[in-house]
Image: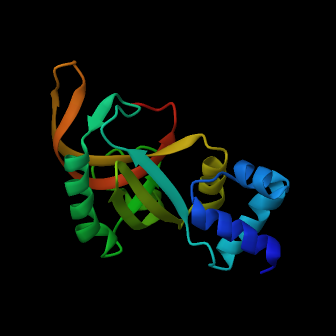
Amino acid sequence: MDKIDEKILKNLLVDARLSARQLSLKLGLSTVTVLSRIKKLEKEKIIKGVLFNLKADEPNANGIIYSKDILGKAIKKYNENYVKNGRALGELGRPKNTMPDVHNIAFKVNEIEFEDDHWNAVIEIIAKRKLVQELIEHNEYRMVTMGVGEISKDEDGNNVVKEMKITGVGIVPKDNCA
């Protein structure tokens, strides 16, 4: 690891959500150089995954609002029942069932937490690695949750989650709202 790698790591420690493009502009490097160095750091297990960040109390891509309280409780249970046991697996694409299909597993959730009004997840790509990495790097995909629960309308006509249990996660195209 050289001084450039150290600069990349320092910037990611300050803001892990920085894209390769943003890092390249901050460090005066090409995006390709930053991406190749990040891949090298991942291969050497210095960087351990990809961070996803989703916001509570605002409509998501499907127009559903997940309240901070409900989402926080669901994530706590998901952590206890899946993440801590190494069973938090996700598919590439929207899972057809509430539990991920073992034949379609693409990543494992290593950490998940609810902080302020954001859901943060660090994932490790474990299969279909190259495809998943490329989709994420081009910022065309987003993380979704699968689960069971109760949705009702609020006074503004928005769908609001009243109760939920997260049973799985997936990575889908950003324009996939179904």
* Residue 47 location (% of width, % of height): 61, 72
Looking at the rendered structure, the number of numbered marks drawn on it comes to: 0
**Residue 9 visible to the viewer:** yes
Check the image and report above or below for 71 versus 153: below
**Residue 107 visible to the viewer:** no
* Residue 112 location (% of width, % of height): 37, 63
Residue at 24%, 70% (x, y): give it. 80
Question: In the picture, residue 50 is in which quadrant?
Answer: bottom right
Residue at 16%, 20% (x, y): give it. 155
Which quarter of the image is occupied by the N terminus? bottom right
In the image, taking residue 122 as reference, residue 135 lies left or right, namely right
Extreme residue in the top direction: 156
Colour convention: rainbow
Question: In the picture, residue 64 is in which quadrant?
Answer: top left
Check the image and report above or below for 7 versus 92: below
Which quarter of the image is occupied by the C terminus? top left
Residue at 81%, 79% (x, y): give it. 2
Residue at 62%, 48% (x, y): give it. 135
Name the foreground residue: 18 vs 44: 18
* Residue 118 location (% of width, % of height): 38, 50
Name the foreground residue: 13 vs 162: 13
In the image, taking residue 46 as reference, residue 110 lies left or right, namely left
* Residue 77 location (% of width, % of height): 21, 63
Check the image and report above or below for 15 versus 145: below
Name the foreground residue: 122 vs 124: 122
